[in-house]
Amino acid sequence: MNSEQLRDAYLQFFAEKGHTIVPSDSLIPSGDPTLLLTSAGMVQFKPYYLGLAVPPNPRLASCQKCVRTTDIESVGDAQHLTFFEMLGNFSIGEYFKKEAIAWAWEFCTQRLGLAPERLWATVYLDDDEAFEHWRGVGVPAERIWRFGEEDNFWGPAGEEGPCGPCSEVHYDFGQAYGCGRDSCGPNCDCGRFVEIWNLVFTQYNQDRQGKRTPLPKPNIDTGMGLERTAAVLQGVASVYDTDLFSPLLKRVSELCGHGYGEDAALDRAMRIVVEHGRGVTFLIADGVVPTNEGRGYVLRRLLRRAATFGRTLGLDEPFLAEVAKATIDKMGHIYPELVAHRDFVLRVIQIEEERFDRALSTGLNLLDKIMAEAGRRGQKLISGAEAFTLYDTYGLPPELTAELAREQGFSVDLAQFQKEMAAQRERARAAQKFGLGEMGVAVAYEQSGIRETKFVGYERLQHSSKIIALFVGGQTVETAYQGQEAELVLEETPFYGEMGGQVGDTGEIRGPQGRMLVRDAVRPLPEAVAHRGTVVEGGLSVGDRVEAVVDRERRLDIARNHTATHLLQAALRQHLGSHVQQRGSLVAPERLRFDFTHLTGLSKEDILKVQRLVNEHIRHNHPVRSMVIPYKEALETGVIALFGEKYGDMVRAIEIGQPRVSAELCGGTHPGSTGEIGLFLIVSEGSVGAGLRRIEAVTGRGAEKLLEERLAELETLSQELIVPVVAVPEKVKSLVDELGAEKKRAQALERELAKSRAEALLGQVESVNGIAVLSARVSASSMEALRQIGDLLRDRLGSGVIVLGAVYNDRPNFLALVTPDLVARGLNAAEIVRKVAQVTGGGGGGRPNLAQAGGKDKGKLEEALGQVSHIIKGL
């Protein structure tokens, strides 16, 4: 039975048992922005289990795409996968253990035809009920094993959610595959047994603190691994020998020239390449793009690991797009999104792999330098800190660093590397924690019992309230006096405290005895607002009744920009695709900044199209409506939530337009209609990281000011060029063309000079051990100029070693070239140039045929070049 027949047989079987067949959900979980990726079939059914929604049928079944990276380092063995398909049947409060076990046995033994004596069951330690049901279908007691929570308790998927004890079905390949120990059985790691089906008896809901409470009704959540079961049915011990992977392995074999099964190490690399290549194809097709965090980081990690192991197969050029094509050809008819997004998938993979290839080459050069420096110290150890830099900055995995180091007789301090990784994770956690304000008063707030400030600023910009706390210099005080910097807390406030990218309000607070200018409103605690500023008149005291007045014009500027970010996201998703997701924003009075996921830069036409779409919505004067609704209802109606944010049961949503143009969860302030924005202009668009773009824009008064400035600049340029404003572009183009022609003439002259210098140097070639060697000092103003001379000399020599030195930027610089025939004999330009540069107190590296280096002492340049003949003699 091939994989397609298995898929069909499973779904047909449970359709006959009264189940509704539900399509696979996306790998980006729908309805749960807090969950990184879909990791199990039950993820899309969580609202049903929790009683938050009613299922179309209490009996459901699906074949779900899943991604798990907990065992990523194990991928490459016979069973572990990051991407897999999970066949599952689910009961929402209807049938339970008896039916789930009986149907599992029936499907395995009757539909799949598996020999009953090959099937073993495991149950939770004290689950006597499940034990007896397995006995009831005919499984002998000695083939039913009990295990604890680590093996036989499942969930939750994510930080919280449904969970419960489980019972697994294991297939026994036979004693010939085992370890021979008397204790060998299910969950033994020898390879004799493979788990093919997990029946989860979902009885509890676990909160973020780990507390479990019974669900309203017990449920069934099962997961049968399609790949593992296919391996069993096809009589092979590895999932990679099934029809799911064979076409992918065949394509990689064609690319690298190695047959699968020829060499154990190469086989492992090929398995990693096809597994990760398949996974990234599905992830990108579902809208994930490479980034340095969250889902994007999972994708990037898989792609880079595949590319790295591809190098061990001799695949030095980008190749993963070919694996993606094979994946789409194999599975596109099952998952049509692969075909629909084929071009996008291939483009993302190509760009990311090329980017990684460049970073990897730089990292390998740095590794050469690190080993050279360690060698000079008489050491053969690469520190964990250096290995971490190679990993964190250049994407060089530690296992590859260790492998390359071993080839040169070096080792890597992997224990220290893990400490560096742990320190980075701790820094990341610390960065996510709520920080103390610049006056460091968070502790004082806690001690004062302040938890929440009621915000009334949606409805009004002036409000009468009472001072409940004052802080000066981080200490609580009863009164703040004229000239003092203070933080003031009100019972209720119209001031918006900085949050969600929107800056805090400014204004003033007037009391019976004094007045404070508020320069910022901040949140020293998540729910509390503090008004920071200077007391400019008299004094303000705890208990005073005051008038809080927000700077109205500034607030309106902020509101215009905030609504514009919502319209901008809608326009980007409309024009570029639904993979666009917000990754950060700044909403200030004078400008807005919006960070979003997208792989490539926007063209001028893209930017203009997005700008026009936003302005079109502004001109339509759509109503902007806020509403407080249940979180689940918001997600079910398509409201966009920011990934990674934690939301309560009730949320505030901003809806623009009828019919809806945009709908997002948002706590910020907005105008009543889009027409109030006036005008939207994009100022800049650029990269802030791989797979992450940033747009900066202005609206309203800021857009008006920008237009005035640009028109004034154009008028000034018109006067300086002595042409009318309309003729400025043509005049500028003419001047640019003239400058370009002049630059080309200069470059041609530089090439002629390089040719003359090269011709003059040919007379200095000497023979060393039968090798033509040329080492010389030349006049050059850059490494590019050195390369030009070196290329000319190499072409004229045909065979030889060339080492050139030049002083520019007041430092010695070197270039070494070795022709291909000598590289084949073992000569290495990187090794030669490092030894030359060492004389001047420097170092360098590169490839065997071309390398460069720099030094410190320019006075020793001639001495360094004089060592070239000795270096060649010693090789």
Image (cartoon, helix red, strand yellow):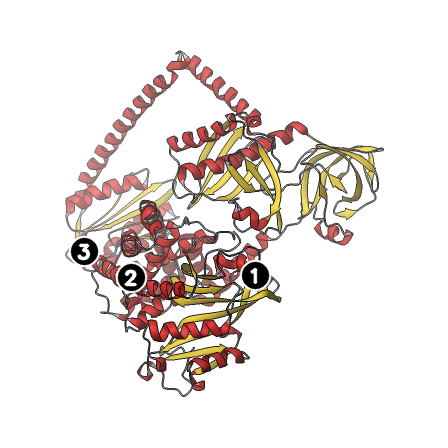
Q: Is label 3 or label 2 in front?
A: 2
Distance of label 2 from label 1 (alpha carbons)? 40 Å
> Would residue 699 be found to the left or right of residue 447 on screen?
left
Q: Is label 1 or label 3 in front?
A: 1
Question: Which quadrant does the N terminus fall into?
Answer: bottom left
Q: Is residue 867 visible?
A: no
* Residue 767 coordinates in the image, percent (x, y): 16, 53
Q: Nearer the viewer, residue 754 or 111?
A: 111
Can you tell which quarter of the image residue 612 is in? top left
Distance of label 1 from label 3 (alpha carbons)? 62 Å
Identify which residue is drawn at 36% across, 86% down. 180
Q: Nearer the viewer, residue 259 or 802?
A: 259
Can you tell which quarter of the image residue 776 is in? top left
* Residue 414 coordinates in the image, percent (x, y): 44, 66
2 or 1: tag closer to the N-terminus: 1
Q: Residues within 10 Å of mark 3 (few under 14, many from 20)?
A: some
Q: Which residue is mark 3?
A: 822
Q: Which residue is mark 2?
A: 312
Q: Is residue 316 above or below residue 678?
A: below
What type is the residue that disc 3 sits on? Leu
CB within 8 Å, label 2 to label 1: no
Q: Regarding mark 1 in the picture, which secondary structure is present there?
A: loop
What type is the residue that disc 1 sits on? Glu
Q: Regarding mark 3 in the picture, which secondary structure is present there?
A: helix
* Residue 76 coordinates in the image, percent (x, y): 34, 67
Q: Which residue is mark 1?
A: 160
What type is the residue that disc 2 sits on? Thr
Q: Is residue 385 above or below residue 149?
A: above
